[in-house]
Amino acid sequence: MTTPLPSWPPRRTGRRTTSPYVAVPREPDDPARTGRRWVRRRARGMTAEAAVAALDVARFDARQNSRFEDLALDERGPAELGEWERIVRLLADAPPGTVYDPDTDDIVRAELAAVREAELREAMRIAARADELQALRELGTLEQAEPRTGGEAVRDELTRRAGGYVQADVDAWLARALALRLGHYRDPAAREVAAGLLTTPVLAHAALLAELLRLVPGVDVGQLAFAARLATTEPEAAGDLAAFLTRARPGR
């Protein structure tokens, strides 16, 4: 038994449907990175002596955590301990009376520069992809384009360029790709990401298309244009209809 695509109702994330800036993907969760950042915030303004005391506490916590399997395998604890050790060495080599300041920490500054460079590269990639899709739109061949990772951010960029107005053809293209599981949307994880990033009308359109295509195998997607109109004007109704058709499946 398969699950509908995308699930309905979609998860709400509080994300705005349009953005005045180029959207960049959110950093994936990284416990080690989170731990190091926490240590740096905690260590701000510490003297060498205070940092040594904090390191002692971190070592005690590490010994305690090693007794529990779930905590022993956690990446954050060792990362925090390693960061305290690095900061202690940094202050030990500094002039007496120096306090820790992450803003002047060469390691921190290098990491921030790398993040900014990655964000710039991603913004450039999104802009280039938006240019590509815009050219395909002008040629009337957008539907032939295969969706790629980051398509949700590209949609936001095209919407931003249009002054915030919804681009109906782009939304229809994304909904069709979701419903048919084209391109990277073959991956369930990519569809889950899309469910948290795309607007309610796009998700409702995709869900309704998926159910209609299941109900009438082989139907031309062009014959289902009414699904886009319904999802645009009455997204909740379209979602309710998709959910109803899902429940009506034989064997459910």
Image (cartoon, grey):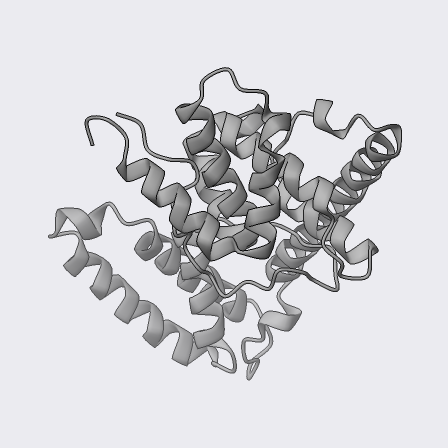
Q: Residue at coordinates 72% horizontally, 54% vertically from top-left?
A: 166
Residue 134 at x, y percent in the picture: 83, 38
As drawn, is 79 to the left or to the right of 65? Answer: right
Location of residue 127 by image quarter? top right
Quarter of the picture containing the C terminus is top left
Q: Kindly identify the residue that appears in the image at 43 percent across and 49 percent down.
A: 239
| Residue 25 in the image: above or below residue 96 | above
The answer to whether residue 2 is above or below residue 57 is: above
In depth, the one of 13 and 88 nearer the eye is 13
The residue shown at (75%, 40%) is 125
Residue drawn at (53%, 34%), measured in percent from left and top?
A: 178
- For the question of whether residue 236 can be seen, the reply is yes
Vertical side of 1 occupied by 114: above or below: below
| Front residue of this view, candidates 118 and 242 | 242
Q: Which residue of the protein is positioned furthest toward the top in this rendering? A: 218
55 or 72: nearer the viewer:
72
Please tell me which residue lies in front, 10 or 127. Answer: 10
* Side of 243 relative to 114 (left or right): left
> Left or right: where does residue 166 sit relative to residue 73?
right
Residue 26 appears in the rendering:
no
